[in-house]
Amino acid sequence: MTSMSGTHDKRRSGTTVGLTATPTAGSWLARLNGWRERRALRRALARMDAHLWADLGFDEAAAREEMDKPFWKG
């Protein structure tokens, strides 16, 4: 049952069920990049005209709703 003897510990199968993993620098960086991208896309949407929104499949209400979301909301 111990890793020193070379046998597999069946209680610890490599999953973290019920436990939260410690965030890594890579996961934080990915989150920050996602926020940055979302903010840039919403700002670009705010600069567009209604005909461009229609080309993207947005009506005015949906475009305004998306633009008004904070960057951290998906």
Image: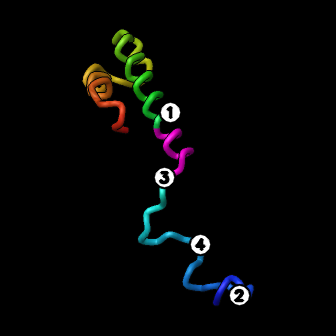
Q: Residue at x 43, y 23 (%)?
A: 41
Name, please, the residue furthest toward the front.
Answer: 4
- The magenta segment is 23-31
Residue 20 image-quadrant placement: bottom left
Q: Position of residue 17 (x, y in %)?
A: 46, 71
Secondary structure beneath dot 3 equals loop
Q: How far apart in space, not on screen, are marks 2 and 4 (Cα)?
A: 14 Å
Q: Label 4 belongs to which residue?
A: 14
Which is nearer the eye, 36 or 54? 36
Q: Which mark is residue 7?
A: 2
Label 3 Cα crowd, 10 Å radius (few <14 / some 14-19 / many 20+): few
The amino acid sitting under disc 2 is: Thr
Q: State the SS at label 4.
A: loop
Q: Mark 4 is on which residue type?
A: Gly
Identify the residue under disc 1: 33
Tell me the CA gap for discs 2 and 3.
30 Å
Mark 3: which amino acid?
Pro
Answer whether residue 47 is magenta in the image: no
- Give residue 23's mark: 3
Seen in the picture, residue 33 relative to 27 is either above or below; the reply is above
| Main secondary-structure element of the magenta-colored stretch | helix
Which is closer to the viewer, label 1 or label 3? 3
Q: Position of residue 16 (x, y in %)?
A: 50, 69
Q: Which is closer to the viewer, label 4 or label 3?
A: 3
**Quadrant housing the N terminus:** bottom right
**Residue sitting at x 73%, y 88%:** 5
Question: Do residues under tags 1 and 3 come within 8 Å of each other at their CB atoms?
Answer: no
